[in-house]
Image (cartoon, grey):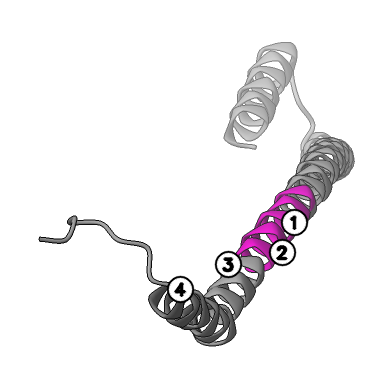
Amino acid sequence: MQGLVEFVLSNFIFTLINLWIMYWVLKKFLFKPTTEYMEGRKKSIADSIQEAEMKNKEADESKAQYDMKLQDIKKERSQIIDEATKRAEKRGDEIIKAAEDEAEKVIERAMTEIQREKQKSLNEMKNEISQLAIAAATKVIEKDLDEGTHHKMIQQFIDEVGETKWQN
């Protein structure tokens, strides 16, 4: 009986050739594509990480620009509100001033009208008093009056003038 393990040169050479063929086939069809795939995957992951970092940086820059624009908008909004408030206050002051001026004009016109009416009333009273005095004088001249009649006519004249004065 021969031993379980025997060294046979032909088997050894055949095994070496088979190993070498197997190594070459595996290298050609398995190791090379797998290595290329792994390198490609590694490169793809590195590119994705780099792209993500760039996008993250761009996002940070965009956020900074957005924050700056937001602050500018807030400043502009405040300026617009301040300007509108100032314009409204100015317009309110103008309206109040115009109303005060108009009120003064109305008061002046009313005072002028009152003065004119007062003067008109005084003139009318003077005319009536003059007419009454002329009428009384005419009556006195027409009649030869005694003292009692004369006092009676004066009293009557005063009563008529008083009534005229109170009627106006």
* Nearer-N-terminus badge (3/1): 3
36 in relation to 140, above or below? below
Q: Nearer the viewer, residue 80 or 98?
A: 80
Question: Circle 2 is placed at which residue position?
Answer: 47
Amino acid type indicated by mark 2? Asp
Given contact means CB atoms under 8 Å apart, are the residues at marks 2 and 1 in contact?
yes
17 in relation to 96, above or below? below
Question: Circle 1 is placed at which residue position?
Answer: 50
Question: Circle 4 is placed at which residue position?
Answer: 9
x then y, percent, for residue 147 = 74, 12
Amino acid type indicated by mark 3? Met
Where does the N terminus fall, quadrant-wise?
Answer: bottom left
Question: Circle 3 is placed at which residue position?
Answer: 38
Query: Of circles 4 and 3, which is in front?
Result: 4
Relative placement, left or right, of 162 versus 14 is right
Instruction: Residue 118: tell me if it is visible.
Output: no
Amino acid type indicated by mark 1? Gln
